[in-house]
Amino acid sequence: MTCNMPIVQSLLENDLYKFTMWQALLHSHPSAQAEYSFVCRNATVFPLAELKQEVEAELDHLCTLSFKQDELDYLSSLRFMKSDFVDFLTVFRFQRRFIEVRAEGEHLRIRAKGPLVHVMGFEIFVLYIVNELYFRRLDQQGVLDVARQRLQAKIDLLKASEASLSGDAATGFMMFDFGLRRRFSGAWQAEVVKRLAEAVPALFRGTSNVLLAKELGLTPIGTMAHEYLQAYQSFGFRLRDFQKAALEGWVQEYRGDLGTALTDVVGMDAFLNDFDLYFAKLFDGLRHDSGDPVEWGEKAIAHYKKLRIDPSTKRLVFSDGLTVPRAIELYRHFRGRIQTSYGIGTDLSNDTPHKALNIVMKITACNGQPVAKLSDSPGKTLCEDETYLAYLRQVFKRQA
């Protein structure tokens, strides 16, 4: 891909969980209104505000795209995608009036506001647009040479460990690419995924990038993200019950498919209070995205045992800032007690001499009221209304 080509080439190049949440929310809350805000959490080499005009141009292009027939056919081939949702996508286009870009001093501000089922899809595109524009401006000399060396080191480690990591679907090591949103570039992510699929097919099992999954014949991976559960804070349920309502909505939509629940919207302890025998039996497992992964996994195992469910029949998916060595460590820690999988993002798609951006675009309001998450990791909580955040902490007995 050359630098003068638009970054987004296909609306299918999105994370799978965007499509699965999109379908569920289109069916359950089609008239909801929402706001999403872009935030950069770390220092940058140059002010991101300098990218404003380029980001504007990329979003203009994004809003001209529609789904191609072969892309719709691919989505239709996934058993959990329903025909009416695919029909909706045949006519869907992003609306430029729903997203605003501005410079505020050195900071880049991006806000999407409008119908939830129209603005929720912007997130991943915005993130990889900003990422690629940013890294294009940095020194390119030798960057991919170093990145390829680092990728080869990961492959060598996986191959050297393969005998001790192998097993069946219940006991073997499984890793996935979760690197779309913070990738160095589209071309580099495609190269990484293809190399891993060719070099260690028994260990590397898929990608969240739906377009790459389609093109490379891999399994697309993903279920739900924070925005799905956060939106339920605004849907008229008692706040204390929003997680149970969201999980029930997921069960009714997917009837046994896509059974991995995200646990850290208000913290693992509060999640487990809601994750009773009913949900523990209906969901295949849990996804970790903040806090200490070993502590989190031990809590999950203890919870299943308390409910008299054999933990070895359930799966834990780890996805928080993983590296390949850390994933192997976690696998060895939990092996034989519970099934595990590992979604690795930035360490695969953006392990270069340049420091990766820590950027997010999160839902901050829905149906005219604030929504938030109370992360188990410091710095991951995002809310623009401190009064609401304090109320959420009080309801779920979380310390500031």
Image (spheres, rainbow, N blue to C red):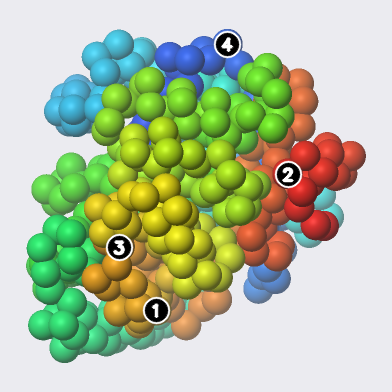
Amino acid type of disc 2? Phe
Which mark's residue is nearer the viewer, 2 or 4? Answer: 2
Q: Earlier in the sequence, mark 1 or mark 2?
A: 1
Mark 4: few, some, or many residues within 10 Å (few <14, many ≥20)?
some
Q: Is residue 209 left or right of residue 55?
A: left
Instruction: Measure the alpha-carbon separation of dots 2 and 4.
Output: 28 Å
Mark 1 is on which residue type?
Arg
Q: Which residue is mark 3?
A: 338
Please give the label number shown on residue 8.
none
**Residue drawn where x is 19% and y is 48% of the image:** 219
Q: Earlier in the sequence, mark 4 or mark 1?
A: 4
Residue appearing at x 84%, y 39% in the figure: 391
The numbered disc on residue 326 is 1
Looking at the image, is 359 positioned above or below residue 92?
A: below
- Judging by the rendered image, the residue that carries numbered circle 4 is 31
* Kind of residue at badge 4: Ser
Between 155 and 319, the residue placed more toward the observer is 319
In the rendered structure, find residue 396 and report the number of the disc placed on it.
2
| Mark 4: secondary structure | loop
Kind of element beneath mark 3: loop
- Location of residue 267 with respect to 61 vertically, above or below: below
